[in-house]
Image: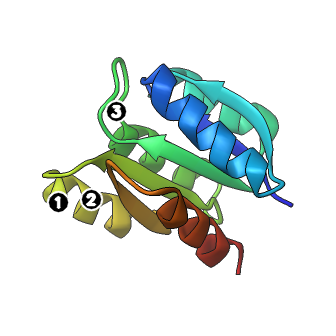
Amino acid sequence: MAKILLIDDSKMSRKMLRTILEGMGHEIVGEVADGVEGLSLYKELHPDITTMDITMPQKDGIACLKEIKEFDADAKVIMITAAGQSSKLMEALKLGAKEFICKPYEPEQIINAIKEVEK
Protein backbone atom coordinates (compact mmCIF):
# COMPACT_ATOMS: atom_id res chain seq x y z
CA MET A 1 0.00 0.00 0.00
CA ALA A 2 1.01 3.60 -0.57
CA LYS A 3 2.67 6.03 1.80
CA ILE A 4 0.57 9.21 1.62
CA LEU A 5 1.18 12.82 2.67
CA LEU A 6 -1.84 15.04 3.42
CA ILE A 7 -1.49 18.81 2.86
CA ASP A 8 -4.66 20.74 3.75
CA ASP A 9 -5.36 23.67 6.06
CA SER A 10 -8.63 22.06 7.20
CA LYS A 11 -8.11 19.70 10.12
CA MET A 12 -11.52 18.16 9.36
CA SER A 13 -10.55 17.46 5.74
CA ARG A 14 -7.31 15.81 6.83
CA LYS A 15 -9.21 13.68 9.36
CA MET A 16 -11.74 12.57 6.71
CA LEU A 17 -8.97 11.74 4.23
CA ARG A 18 -7.01 9.85 6.89
CA THR A 19 -10.09 7.75 7.73
CA ILE A 20 -10.78 6.90 4.07
CA LEU A 21 -7.16 6.19 3.15
CA GLU A 22 -6.29 4.16 6.23
CA GLY A 23 -9.49 2.21 5.62
CA MET A 24 -8.02 1.30 2.22
CA GLY A 25 -4.86 0.06 3.96
CA HIS A 26 -2.64 3.04 3.10
CA GLU A 27 -0.19 4.62 5.53
CA ILE A 28 -0.45 8.33 6.28
CA VAL A 29 3.21 9.32 6.69
CA GLY A 30 2.50 12.97 7.49
CA GLU A 31 -0.04 15.74 7.50
CA VAL A 32 0.41 19.49 7.52
CA ALA A 33 -1.74 22.62 7.21
CA ASP A 34 0.07 24.70 4.58
CA GLY A 35 2.25 24.53 1.49
CA VAL A 36 5.45 25.68 3.21
CA GLU A 37 5.35 22.77 5.65
CA GLY A 38 4.03 20.51 2.90
CA LEU A 39 7.01 21.10 0.62
CA SER A 40 9.44 20.56 3.49
CA LEU A 41 7.75 17.34 4.58
CA TYR A 42 7.54 16.09 0.98
CA LYS A 43 11.31 16.50 0.60
CA GLU A 44 11.88 14.71 3.91
CA LEU A 45 9.44 11.83 3.48
CA HIS A 46 9.28 11.19 -0.30
CA PRO A 47 5.67 9.91 -0.14
CA ASP A 48 4.21 7.70 -2.86
CA ILE A 49 1.16 9.97 -3.17
CA THR A 50 0.33 13.46 -1.89
CA THR A 51 -3.14 14.94 -1.50
CA MET A 52 -3.19 18.73 -1.44
CA ASP A 53 -5.71 21.51 -1.05
CA ILE A 54 -5.36 24.48 -3.40
CA THR A 55 -6.40 27.27 -1.04
CA MET A 56 -4.07 27.41 1.98
CA PRO A 57 -2.23 30.08 4.00
CA GLN A 58 1.43 31.00 3.44
CA LYS A 59 1.88 28.97 0.24
CA ASP A 60 -1.10 27.79 -1.76
CA GLY A 61 -1.40 24.40 -3.40
CA ILE A 62 -0.46 25.67 -6.87
CA ALA A 63 2.85 27.12 -5.66
CA CYS A 64 3.56 24.04 -3.55
CA LEU A 65 2.74 21.68 -6.45
CA LYS A 66 5.10 23.59 -8.73
CA GLU A 67 7.95 23.30 -6.22
CA ILE A 68 7.25 19.63 -5.51
CA LYS A 69 7.33 18.87 -9.26
CA GLU A 70 10.60 20.81 -9.62
CA PHE A 71 12.06 18.72 -6.78
CA ASP A 72 10.55 15.42 -8.00
CA ALA A 73 9.20 15.32 -11.55
CA ASP A 74 7.58 11.94 -10.85
CA ALA A 75 5.59 13.16 -7.82
CA LYS A 76 2.02 11.85 -7.72
CA VAL A 77 -0.18 14.67 -6.43
CA ILE A 78 -3.97 14.71 -6.15
CA MET A 79 -5.42 18.20 -5.80
CA ILE A 80 -8.50 18.60 -3.60
CA THR A 81 -10.36 21.91 -3.55
CA ALA A 82 -13.69 23.63 -3.23
CA ALA A 83 -15.92 23.68 -6.27
CA GLY A 84 -15.74 26.82 -8.37
CA GLN A 85 -11.97 26.94 -8.77
CA SER A 86 -11.81 25.42 -12.23
CA SER A 87 -9.11 27.82 -13.50
CA LYS A 88 -6.82 26.86 -10.61
CA LEU A 89 -7.56 23.17 -11.18
CA MET A 90 -6.61 23.52 -14.86
CA GLU A 91 -3.37 25.22 -13.81
CA ALA A 92 -2.66 22.38 -11.35
CA LEU A 93 -3.18 19.77 -14.08
CA LYS A 94 -0.84 21.68 -16.42
CA LEU A 95 1.77 21.71 -13.64
CA GLY A 96 1.55 17.95 -13.31
CA ALA A 97 -1.18 17.09 -10.81
CA LYS A 98 -2.33 13.54 -11.54
CA GLU A 99 -5.96 13.89 -10.40
CA PHE A 100 -8.29 16.42 -8.83
CA ILE A 101 -11.29 16.16 -6.55
CA CYS A 102 -13.81 18.88 -5.69
CA LYS A 103 -15.12 19.35 -2.16
CA PRO A 104 -17.51 18.21 -0.93
CA TYR A 105 -16.59 14.72 -2.09
CA GLU A 106 -17.76 11.20 -1.53
CA PRO A 107 -15.32 8.59 -0.17
CA GLU A 108 -15.63 6.70 -3.46
CA GLN A 109 -14.10 9.68 -5.32
CA ILE A 110 -11.01 9.53 -3.09
CA ILE A 111 -10.78 5.76 -3.47
CA ASN A 112 -11.02 5.98 -7.27
CA ALA A 113 -8.46 8.81 -7.52
CA ILE A 114 -5.94 6.89 -5.39
CA LYS A 115 -6.43 3.73 -7.46
CA GLU A 116 -5.95 5.72 -10.66
CA VAL A 117 -2.73 7.35 -9.41
CA GLU A 118 -1.34 4.02 -8.18
CA LYS A 119 -1.47 2.52 -11.71
Q: How far apart are marks 1 and 2 (CA)?
A: 5 Å
**Which residue was labeled with disc 3?**
60
Say which amino acid is labelled 2: Leu
Mark 2 crowd level (few <14, some 14–19, many ≥20, 10 Å Cα): many
**Which residue was labeled with disc 2?**
89
**Which residue was labeled with disc 1?**
86
The secondary structure type at the circle numbered 2 is helix
Q: Distance between the residues labelled 3 and 2?
A: 12 Å
Q: Is residue 117 above or below residue 83?
A: below
Q: Which mark is residue 31?
A: none
Earlier sequence position, callout 3 versus callout 2:
3
Would you say the residues marked 1 and 2 are in contact, meaning their CB atoms lie under 8 Å apart?
yes
Residue at horizontal 60 percent and vertical 37 percent from the top: 6
Q: Where is residue 2 in the image (x, y as percent from the top left)?
A: 81, 57
Is residue 34 at least partly visible in the picture? no
Which quadrant of the figure has residue 63? top left
Q: Is residue 30 above or below residue 19?
A: above
Mark 1 crowd level (few <14, some 14–19, many ≥20, 10 Å Cα): few
Say which amino acid is labelled 1: Ser
Q: Where is residue 23 in the image (x, y as percent from the top left)?
A: 76, 50
In the image, 38 versus 52, the foreground residue is 52
Q: How far apart are marks 1 and 3 (CA)?
A: 15 Å
Nearer the observer: mark 1 or 3; the answer is 1
Q: Is residue 26 above or below residue 44?
A: below
Please give left or right for residue 86 compared with residue 58 in the image.
Answer: left
